[in-house]
């Protein structure tokens, strides 16, 4: 958790987040108490575990949390909203994206304020990842963490998913979870595109020597030549020596030739 900078807060601190702050550094940045972070994370997991997965909605408008919520939803079976939250999804039943969840989990109370406000209208409890400057209005369970770093967001969602699966009995506590934490980290689309280009270039480079080796094969040396076709000096092929038949076409027998046709076969145009 320390290597992922989960404990790094901001220079501002709200009144509701003061109990979760360990101390303030000389440069003004507040440090969060990761012991309380773990306690609230386990509490959130115990709230999530008894609820049916289809009745849980995880939301992240922050780009660093898109991949994390999608992976969390894929592993736990809940619904995910990655990107812009459509207003009215919890209150307007006419909308196509209307949902009636029993629990809402958000990545940042500031960027996901619309979802939190609509959840308060219909009495849906909210679990939120809160930084030191987060507003806790309409938030029922706050998990103190750094919700601005790609590694800290991915790690908290991974820990939450693992704890939920352990409480449900899907994976034993004595066994390591097979899903790596790297799968929950945000990846820049440009980096993914560069990796795909490098992989394609490496594949072409590996295929190029095979094609050049196939092109350099000496196909003439694979089969023996007819010794009758080779000239005496060995300089080239003697095509005149091919075949034992006569080369004077006029000396061929006239049987079956065109000259045997009777003269009476004329059509009479003359």
Image (tube, rainbow, N blue to C red):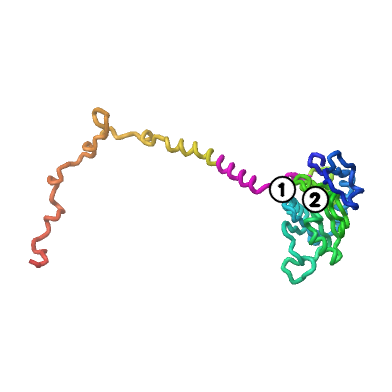
Residue 47: x %, y % from top left? 87, 56
The quadrant where residue 239 appears: top left
Q: Where does the C terminus fall, quadrant-wise?
A: bottom left
Q: Are dots 2 and 1 in contact, CB under 8 Å?
A: no
In which quadrant of the rendered image does the N terminus lie? top right
Instruction: Report the residue that reaches farthest toward the bottom.
Output: 94
Q: CA distance from mark 2 to mark 1?
A: 16 Å
User: Could you say whether the residue bearing mark 1 is in a helix, strand or loop?
Assistant: loop
Q: In front here: 130 or 263?
A: 130
Q: Specify whether 241 is left or right of 95.
A: left
The outermost residue toward the top is 233
Please report the residue visible at 72 percent of the width from the left and 59 percent of the height from the top: 84
For the question of whether residue 41 can be seen, the reply is no
Q: Nearer the viewer, residue 266 or 168?
A: 168
* Residue under pointer 2: 161
Residue found at x 82% / y 60%: 116
Crowding near pointer 2: few (<14 within 10 Å), some, many (20+)? many
Q: Residue at x 76, y 65 (%)?
A: 87
Left or right of residue 239, residue 160 in this image: right
Question: Looking at the picture, how far across and down is residue 220, in whole percent?
Answer: 36, 35
Question: Which circle's residue, 2 or 1, is located before the other in the chain?
Answer: 2
Circle 2: element type: helix
**Local crowd size for mark 1, using a 10 Å CA cut-off: few (<14), some (14–19), many (≥20):** some
**Front residue of 184 and 174:** 184
Q: Position of residue 7 (x, y in %)?
A: 84, 43
- In this rendering, the label closer to the viewer, 2 or 1: 1
* Outermost front residue: 27
Q: Is residue 194 magenta?
A: yes
Looking at this rendering, what residue extends furthest in the right direction?
A: 19
* Magenta-drawn segment: 177-202
Name the residue at 24% across, 27% down.
233
């Amino acid at each position: 958790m320390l290597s992922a900078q989960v404990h790094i807060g901001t220079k501002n601190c709200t009144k509701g987040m003061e109990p979760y702050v360990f101390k303030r550094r000389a440069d003004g940045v507040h440090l969060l108490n990761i012991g309380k972070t773990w306690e609230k994370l386990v509490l959130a997991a115990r709230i999530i575990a008894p609820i049916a997965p289809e009745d849980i909605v995880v939301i992240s408008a922050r780009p660093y949390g898109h991949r994390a919520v999608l992976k969390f939803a894929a592993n736990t079976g809940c619904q995910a909203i990655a990107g812009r939250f459509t207003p009215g999804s919890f209150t307007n039943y006419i909308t196509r994206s209307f949902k009636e969840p029993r629990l809402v989990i958000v990545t940042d109370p500031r960027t996901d304020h619309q979802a939190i406000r609509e959840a308060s209208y219909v009495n849906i409890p909210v679990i939120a990842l809160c930084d030191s400057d987060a507003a806790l209005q309409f938030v029922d369970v706050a998990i103190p963490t750094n919700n601005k770093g790609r590694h800290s967001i991915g790690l908290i969602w991974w820990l939450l998913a693992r704890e939920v699966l352990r409480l449900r009995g899907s994976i034993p506590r004595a066994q390591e979870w097979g899903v790596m934490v790297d799968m929950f980290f945000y990846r820049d689309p440009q980096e993914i595109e560069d990796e795909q280009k490098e992989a394609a270039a490496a594949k072409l480079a590996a295929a190029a020597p095979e094609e050049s080796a196939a092109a350099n094969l000496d196909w003439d040396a694979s089969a023996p030549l007819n010794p009758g076709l080779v000239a005496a000096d060995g300089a080239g092929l003697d095509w005149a020596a091919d075949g034992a038949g006569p080369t004077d076409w006029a000396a061929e027998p006239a049987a079956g030739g065109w000259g045997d046709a009777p003269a009476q076969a004329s059509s009479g145009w003359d």
